[in-house]
Image: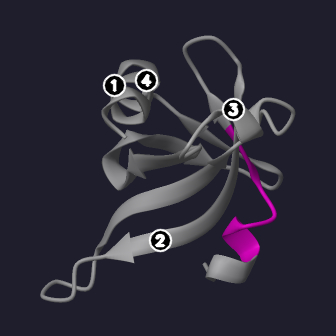
Amino acid sequence: MKLSELITKDVINEQDGLKLGKVYDLEIDPASGKVNFIKVKDGFRILSFLKNNNDIEIPWNKIIKIGNDVIIVDTYLNVNSKKEEK
């Protein structure tokens, strides 16, 4: 799958069904060539000006399914803690 195909998909949290945003980048381990994280822009654009950084890094192993239109992730607690760290 190409990055251009991933960035058209919404990222949905399986825990509560919330839209987390859209993929805009990947972090790849140069030694192994494996994807470490998908980088997601926060889906709540209205409040994004109130935050310094509204990006979320979701570990690749937290992706449950990549469908035609969405990416389902199981990372609610990890996403919140990542956002608070930044």
Gap in angstroms between the C-alphas marked 2 and 3:
25 Å
Three-letter residue code for mark 2: Leu
Work out whether 72 lies above or below 67: above
Q: Marks 2 and 1: in contact by CB < 8 Å? A: no
Gap in angstroms between the C-alphas marked 1 and 4:
4 Å
Work out whether 4 lies above or below 37: below
Q: Position of residue 50 (x, y in %)?
A: 69, 32
Q: Nearer the viewer, mark 3 or mark 4?
A: 3
Is tag 1's residue or tag 3's residue first in the polypeptide sequence? Answer: 3
Write down the residue under mark 3: 50
Write down the residue under mark 2: 26
Q: In terms of secondary structure, where does tag 1 sit? A: helix
Q: Marks 4 and 2: in contact by CB < 8 Å? A: no
Write down the residue under mark 1: 81
- Identity of the residue drawn at 43% across and 50% down: 57
Nearer-the-camera pick, 52 or 64: 52
Is tag 3's residue or tag 4's residue first in the polypeptide sequence? Answer: 3
Q: Nearer the viewer, mark 1 or mark 2?
A: 1
Magenta segment range?
A: 5-11
Work out whether 70 lies above or below 76: below
Q: In terms of secondary structure, where does tag 2 sit? A: strand
Q: Marks 4 and 1: in contact by CB < 8 Å? A: yes
Q: Position of residue 6 (x, y in %)?
A: 68, 67
Three-letter residue code for mark 1: Ser
Is tag 1's residue or tag 2's residue first in the polypeptide sequence? Answer: 2
- Identity of the residue drawn at 78% across and 33% down: 44
